[in-house]
Image: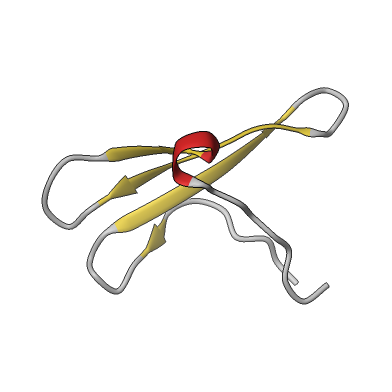
Amino acid sequence: MGKPAGWQWLDDGGSLMITEARGIDGKIAETYGTYMPPYGEMQRLTEETDGIELAMVGE
């Protein structure tokens, strides 16, 4: 099973990218993202303010 990488295009015409940055110990140090709506300005997303949470499905 592959692991998604890069931008994901959404049904509304926008695009989304979420990143997990890891420390040298392999633990997640930060989760953040970028949402680009079809029209309008890019929005920065953070774990603290937007509640981003990633989970592996199907393993």
Q: At x 24% / y 40%, what residue is drawn? A: 42
Q: At which x and y percent is residue 23?
A: 77, 25
Q: At which x and y percent is residue 22?
A: 73, 31
Q: Give the color scheme: rainbow, by chain, secondary structure or one colour.
A: secondary structure
Q: At x 43% / y 53%, what residue is drawn? A: 7
Q: At x 69% / y 60%, what residue is drawn? A: 55
Q: Depth check: 11 or 1 in front?
A: 11
Q: In this view, does 18 lie above or below 27?
A: below
Q: Is residue 37 left or right of residue 53?
A: left
Q: In this view, does 18 lie to the left or right of 43?
A: right
Farthest residue to the right: give it: 25
In which image quadrant can residue 57 be found?
bottom right
Q: Is residue 23 left or right of residue 7?
A: right
Q: At which x and y percent is residue 12?
A: 24, 70
Q: At which x and y percent is residue 50?
A: 45, 44
Quadrant containing the N terminus in the rendered view: bottom right
Q: At x 33% / y 56%, what residue is drawn? A: 15
